Amino acid sequence: MKSLRFISAEAFVSNAEFARKSLGAVAHDLFPLLFKASYLLEQGEVIHDLVENWPLFDFNMGKLLGATLDYQEDLSHRTCSVCLESCLTGLRDYVLNQSSPYMKKLKVVDLTGIKDVEVQFCKCKKTMGRWARTQLLSKLCSELLVYLQRAQCNPGTFEISINVLIDLFVTERNYELVVQALLKKCSCPLKICCVAFRSDNLTLQKFFYIIKLTDPSLLRKLEIVHNVHLEMEHLEMLFNSIHFPLLMSLTLPARTFNVRRFTATDEQMLSNIGEKMGEMSQLTELSMSFSILTGRIQKLLSPLKTPLKMLDVSNCSLNHADMAFLANSFHANHLEVLDLSGHDIPELYPSTFFKLLSHCSSVLRSLTLEDCNIQDTHVNMLILGLSPCQKLQEFKFIGNPLSSQALKHLFTFLCELPMLKNVEFPVPRDCYPIGITYPIDDASLCRFDHQKYERVAEELNLILLQANREDVKASTPLFGSYDAAVQETNNELGAYLIKSFKETLEKFTTSFSKMS
């Protein structure tokens, strides 16, 4: 529902030439309204001029595009390339514009409220993801500094100091540009303040160098993901050399820990890492997927002084002692997001799992149980365990050997969870050829009866429809959930994997030649 004010704002900005000429006569408090209207209509030129002449002390994208009294729709998930590029270039020109009718008051720009999602509704259909935003802002900061050094600017320009809060996403491809922008941060009017940092496809040397440049004292979220070969000794070195007082969320690369080859030194190292994480008084989110942590969860997590709200220990080979620790720890009552994928829950630790589930049921928002060997005979028990989880918004359980009949039974129950919005369910077992084994390998993943699957999917959606739960999105992402960061950099990731494969083949060929 749009207010009369918002409708008027749309009419004003729809004529870009008129709007740009008239900005000098616009009251300060109307700028946020005009900005959201311009963003909705993708009026790039108007957005640029609004930002270039911004008369307020702060510019918060999340608040500006979020739900307001004048227009309830949240636009912060629209990463429209036209709008975002206009916004960032307008910010650069705010610094350079010496003829603006408004006194320069801007002190803080917050770009962290922008959300990258799979489906975009902008007309241009061109998006600017987190990596591209990092790239463009770094480029503009460097160019701005070069221009100021060469041109004869108003002395007041050098007194402008604007903190730009952003979630940086750095890979090999944009590494040099971001480093240069961070190195010159003190001299540049636009000061990059990194509150979240994601690193993909970087050597350890480059990662350690750039993470220090970001000012770790400001970091709230740290993601070290694909092709950063961080092992336990490097993690200990990181925590010993850098302090992260505000860190709330930590994601580590796959296989950071491997207790199968532990020595006494490794045990001490693990204890040190746990103690260092315990010193991070804000840490509430931890992801350690595909590490081998058998029997060591307690040693790693017990030093934490604040309860975790998010825990991802998917494919970490947890044993009964690990699950018992989680179920009885003080974390259990606070877990809002839990991923236990890749563990045979019904076989290994059914009672402790359901104990953990009961403890976190009052706060649990997202539960992922992919490839957990949940079969038809376990569905009633699963329903019993999920029944208290009345705040559950997301349930993912692909990769489990469930029949279409069991899925229908489960969906009938899921309709009763009032806050549920997203369900990821497996291809029914009876859609695959007889004799298929679980977990299903990648080669066999798509070898199912697609027509039968579509019929079952329609029946499941009909169950939701008949229960008036059209708000629930049900899907089967065979190759995992959408990851905006991976989607944006998949070409670079693919090139890196090909390069690594080529180097491995060359080493193998060389070794084979020597043997011959």
Image: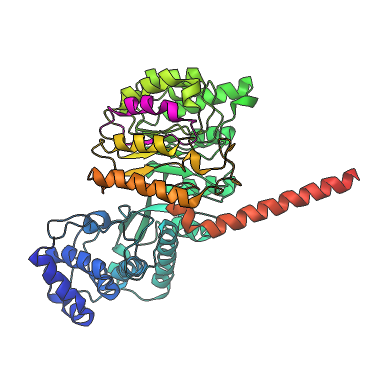
Quadrant where the C terminus is found in the figure: top right
Could you say where residue 43 lies in the image, as x and y percent from the top left? 27, 73
Furthest residue toward right: 516
Residue 177: image x %, image y %? Answer: 50, 61
Examine the structure image and report whether residue 293 is included in the region drawn in magenta: no
Of 466 and 333, which appears nearest the observer? 466
Q: Is residue 377 visible?
A: yes
Of residue 203 and residue 459, the one placed in the foreground of this image is 459
Q: Which residues are magenta?
A: 364-390
Residue 365: quarter of image:
top left
Q: Is residue 345 above or below residue 174?
A: above
At x 29%, y 63%, the residue is 160
Residue occupying image coordinates x 20% and y 80%: 15
Tell which of 489 and 476 is nearer to you: 476
The answer to whether residue 482 shows anywhere in this view is: no
Q: Position of residue 212 (x, y in %)?
A: 48, 46
Above or below 4: residue 513 = above
- Image-based side of 242 in relation to 516, left or right: left
Residue reaching furthest left? 4
- 57 sits to left or right of 274: left
Q: How many marks?
A: 0
Left or right, residue 271 beside residue 325:
right
* Relative to 498, residue 153 above or below: below
For the N terminus, the image quarter is bottom left
Q: Is residue 377 magenta?
A: yes
